[in-house]
Image (tube, rainbow, N blue to C red):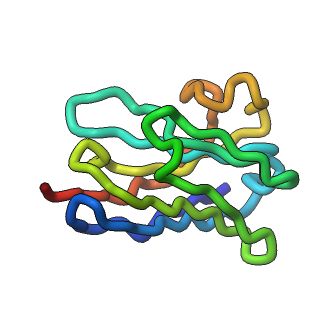
Amino acid sequence: VQLQASGGGLVQAGGSLRLSCAASGSTLRSNYIGWYRQATGKEREFAGGIRWNGGNTAYADSAKGRFTISRDKASSTLYLQMSSLKPEDTANYYCAASPGVIWSNLAVPSAYNYWGPGTLVTVSS
């Protein structure tokens, strides 16, 4: 099982960034894959998630209207397109998966068994 997030970097407030998450192995048997983020000194929080086969998405309130999750099934890659970025979006961003995740616990970090290394997003003011 492998999840590898990439694409983080430094961006000015108001800018955009696209993160990628390459998935492989048994991760692909997960129904849902989530994007989480964790800022320094804060708990890990749900940013959004997608149903791998149906493409249904869900977003945290803080992400609605600014973040868009998509996936390319052919390459087993998940994307998080972020726009109108704010300094408070600064965090390490992670993708996560688990066969046990269902729609009702998509936003619950403990529901996920597999986490990839994070990619750091820094938004300057």
Residue at the far bottom: name it: 75
Position of the N terminus, as image quadrant, is bottom right
Q: Residue at x 67, y 61 (%)?
A: 70
Residue at the far left: name it: 125
Q: Residue at x 52, y 34 (%)?
A: 60
> Between 105 and 124, which is closer to the camera in this rendering?
124
Q: Residue at x 27, y 29 (%)?
A: 42
110 on left or right of 53: left
99 on left or right of 67: right
Measuring from the top left, give residue 84's x and y in whole percent.
Answer: 36, 57
Q: Residue at x 35, y 39 (%)?
A: 38
Measuring from the top left, give residue 58's x and y in whole percent.
Answer: 66, 39
Measuring from the top left, give residue 108's x and y in whole percent.
Answer: 58, 25
Q: In the picture shown, does residue 109 fall above or below 121?
A: above
Measuring from the top left, give residue 71's x and y in whole percent.
Answer: 70, 64
Q: In the picture shown, does residue 72 fall above or below 44?
A: below
